C-alpha cells in the first residue's frame, strides 16, 4: 500500500519533522532524568521536610483564608462535603503525581510527565495551563493578602487603607499596592536562594497551622446543630459547584513536584512529601470548614475574605483573637505567594530548557537560582495583581489545574503500559482503575464550571496555541531530533 502523506507532511523541509511528528514527539524518560543531574542547573538542597513545607505552604491558605467565604453561600453547610469532593479528586491525582515524581524527578512537573508520555503539543498545553494556574493564583492570593492587611489595620487602629491602593484602575481604584508588594517581597526571598527561601516558608507554614488550630479550638465551642440544617440547601449541584471552586485550594502538591530537581533524594522523598502534605491539608480544611459553618449560620457568610476573623469576634465577643488570626493570615497568604511563585519559575525553567520559551528562563546563577526567570515572572505577576481585575480568569485556573492533573493520570497509564521496566519508588494502588477515576473526577469538576469560566479558559488556550505554533514548535530542542518513544 502506498504511504499517504498530508499536505503539511509533504511540505516539510528536509531535516525538519512533519507536523504530526512535531506535535507528538516525546522526550525520553532517560533524557529527562539525565538533565536533572548534569550539574549545570538547579542544585539539590531540600529533604523530606522542606518538600513537605512547600506542599503545605502552597496549599494551606487560599481555600480557607480567601475562598471559603465564596463557597459557603453556594453549598451551605455542605461546604464540608465540597472540601471532601475536591480533596478526593485531588487525592486521585496526588497518587499519580507521587508515582510520576518518583520516576521522573524533573522540575517541569505535569508538563514534563506529559512530554515523556503524550507528546510535545499536549505537554505545551499542559505547561500553558500551569502558567495560568500559577501566575493568576499568585496574583489572586496577593489581592487576598492586601485585604487581610487592610483588615488587620482596621482591627488594630480603626483605620483602613484608601480604596485607591486596594484596587486597580478598572475596579475603581488606582493600583492594588499591597498585592504588588507581597509578590515583590517573595521575589527577593527567592533570589536569596532556595535554601534560604525554604527556611522562610517553613516558619510561615508553622504560623499558619498554629492559627488554624487556634481557630478550630475556639470556634468548636460555639458549634450549634441547627446551623447544619438544611445541610444541602442548593442540592448536590451546589456541592459540585463549590467543590470545583475549592479545587483551586488543592494545587499545592503540584508545587512539590516542581521542586524535584532541588530535592536531595527525589525518588524517596517526593512521593512521601506529596502524600503527607495532601492528607494533612485536607484534614485541616475539613476541620476548619466544619467549625466555621457550625459556629455561624451559613446565611451569615458574605462574599468576602475575612469571614474566619469575623467568626472569632462573634464567638469570643472581643476582637483580640481576630487580630491574632488576621496577623497570622497575613503570613499564611504570604507563604502561598512565595511557594506558588517559586513553582511558576520552575515550570518556566523546564519549558525554557526544552526550547519552547526563551532561554533566559533557564539561565541560573552560581547559587543555582534562575535569576532572570524569577525577576521577569515576579514583575509581570506584580503588575497583573496591581492593575488587572482577574475575574473569570481566576476561576479558570481551576480548569487549567484539573486538565493538567488529568494528564498526569493519563501519564501513569501510558508508562505502566509502555515502560513497565522503569523503577517506581511509589506505585498508584488499584491501577489502572485509580488513574481512570482520577481522570473522570477531574472531568466531572471541570464540567461543573460556568460557561463564562470556560470562555475565559478557551481564550487563554487560543493565546497559548498562537505562541506555540508561532514560537515554541520551531525552537523546540527536539525540532531536528527524530521523534522517539518513551
Image: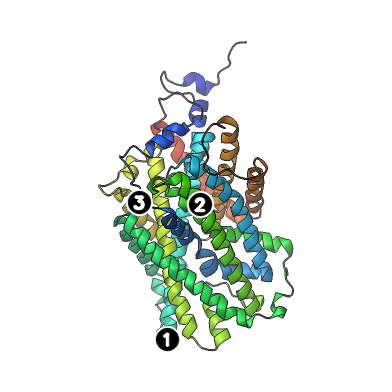
- C-beta proximity under 8 Å, tags 1 and 2: no
For numbered disc 1, what is the local secondary structure? loop
Residue 54 can be seen, yes or no? yes
In the rendered image, residue 198, in percent from the top left (x then y), is placed at: 37, 58
Please tell me whether residue 146 is drawn above or below residue 374 in the rendered image: below
In the depicted view, which residue is nearer to us: 178 or 351? 351
For numbered disc 2, what is the local secondary structure? helix
Residue drawn at 48 percent across, 23 percent down = 18
In three-dimensional space, the C-alpha distance between marks 2 and 3, rounded to whole angstroms, equals 17 Å
- C-beta proximity under 8 Å, tags 1 and 3: no
Residue on which disc 3 sits = 45
Mark 1 or 3: the one toward you: 3
Left or right: 220, with 321 as reference point: right
The N terminus lies in quadrant: top right
In the rendered image, residue 267, in percent from the top left (x then y), is placed at: 46, 44
In the rendered image, residue 371, in percent from the top left (x then y), is placed at: 29, 50
Question: Mark 1 or mark 2: which comes first in sequence?
Answer: 1
Please tell me whether residue 341 is drawn above or below residue 409 in the rendered image: below
Left or right: 234, with 480 as reference point: right
For numbered disc 3, what is the local secondary structure? loop
Residue drawn at 57 percent across, 68 percent down = 68
Question: Mark 2 or mark 3: which comes first in sequence?
Answer: 3
In three-dimensional space, the C-alpha distance between marks 1 and 2, rounded to whole angstroms, equals 45 Å
Question: Mark 1 or mark 3: which comes first in sequence?
Answer: 3
Residue drawn at 52 percent across, 39 percent down = 114
Give the residue furthest to the left: 366
- Circle 2 crowding by C-alpha within 10 Å: few under 14, some 14–19, many from 20: many
Please tell me whether residue 94 is drawn above or below residue 231 in the rendered image: above
Residue on which disc 2 sits = 272
Residue on which disc 1 sits = 158
Amino acid at each position: 500500500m502506498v504511504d499517504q502523506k498530508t499536505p503539511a507532511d509533504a511540505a516539510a523541509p528536509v531535516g525538519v519533522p512533519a507536523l504530526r511528528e512535531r506535535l507528538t514527539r516525546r522526550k525520553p524518560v532517560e533524557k529527562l532524568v539525565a538533565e536533572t543531574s548534569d550539574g549545570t542547573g538547579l542544585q539539590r538542597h531540600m529533604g523530606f521536610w522542606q518538600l513537605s513545607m512547600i506542599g503545605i505552604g502552597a496549599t494551606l491558605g487560599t481555600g480557607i483564608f480567601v475562598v471559603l467565604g465564596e463557597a459557603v453561600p453556594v453549598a451551605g453547610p455542605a461546604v464540608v462535603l465540597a472540601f471532601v469532593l475536591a480533596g478526593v479528586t485531588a487525592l486521585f491525582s496526588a497518587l499519580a503525581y507521587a508515582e510520576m515524581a518518583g520516576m521522573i524527578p524533573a522540575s517541569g512537573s505535569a508538563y514534563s510527565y506529559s512530554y515523556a508520555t503524550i507528546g510535545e503539543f499536549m505537554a505545551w498545553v499542559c505547561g500553558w495551563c500551569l502558567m495560568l494556574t500559577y501566575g493568576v493564583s499568585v496574583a489572586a492570593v496577593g489581592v487576598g493578602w492586601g485585604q487581610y492587611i487592610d483588615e488587620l489595620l482596621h482591627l488594630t487602629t480603626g483605620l483602613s487603607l484608601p480604596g485607591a491602593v486596594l484596587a486597580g484602575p478598572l475596579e475603581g481604584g488606582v493600583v492594588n499596592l499591597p498585592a504588588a508588594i507581597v509578590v515583590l517581597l517573595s521575589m527577593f526571598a527567592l533570589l536569596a536562594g532556595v535554601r534560604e527561601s525554604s527556611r522562610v516558608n517553613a516558619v510561615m507554614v508553622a504560623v499558619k497551622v498554629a492559627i488554624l488550630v487556634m481557630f478550630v479550638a475556639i470556634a468548636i465551642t460555639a458549634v450549634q446543630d441547627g446551623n447544619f440544617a438544611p445541610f444541602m440547601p442548593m442540592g448536590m449541584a451546589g456541592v459540585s459547584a463549590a467543590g470545583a471552586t475549592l479545587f483551586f485550594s488543592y494545587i499545592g502538591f503540584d508545587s512539590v513536584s516542581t521542586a524535584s530537581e532541588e530535592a536531595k533524594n527525589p525518588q524517596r522523598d517526593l512521593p512521601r512529601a506529596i502524600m503527607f502534605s495532601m492528607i494533612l491539608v485536607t484534614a485541616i480544611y475539613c476541620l476548619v470548614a466544619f467549625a466555621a459553618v457550625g459556629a455561624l449560620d451559613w446565611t451569615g457568610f458574605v462574599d468576602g475574605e475575612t469571614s474566619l476573623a469575623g467568626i472569632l469576634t462573634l464567638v469570643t465577643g472581643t476582637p483580640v483573637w481576630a487580630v491574632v488570626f488576621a496577623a497570622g493570615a497575613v503570613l499564611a497568604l504570604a507563604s502561598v505567594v512565595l511557594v506558588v511563585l517559586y513553582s511558576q519559575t520552575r515550570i518556566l525553567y523546564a519549558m525554557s530548557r526544552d526550547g519552547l520559551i526563551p532561554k533566559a528562563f533557564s539561565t541560573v546563577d552560581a547559587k543555582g537560582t534562575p535569576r532572570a526567570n524569577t525577576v521577569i515572572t515576579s514583575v509581570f505577576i506584580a503588575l497583573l495583581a496591581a492593575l488587572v481585575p482577574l475575574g473569570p480568569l481566576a476561576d479558570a485556573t481551576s480548569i487549567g489545574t484539573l486538565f493538567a492533573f488529568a494528564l498526569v493520570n493519563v501519564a501513569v497509564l501510558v508508562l505502566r503500559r509502555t515502560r513497565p521496566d522503569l523503577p517506581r519508588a511509589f506505585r498508584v494502588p488499584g491501577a489502572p482503575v485509580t488513574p481512570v477515576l482520577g481522570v473522570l473526577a477531574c472531568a466531572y469538576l471541570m464540567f461543573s464550571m460556568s460557561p463564562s469560566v470556560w470562555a475565559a479558559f478557551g481564550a487563554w488556550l487560543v493565546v497559548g496555541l498562537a505562541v506555540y505554533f508561532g514560537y515554541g514548535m520551531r525552537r523546540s530542542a527536539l525540532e531536528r531530533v527524530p521523534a522517539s518513544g518513551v
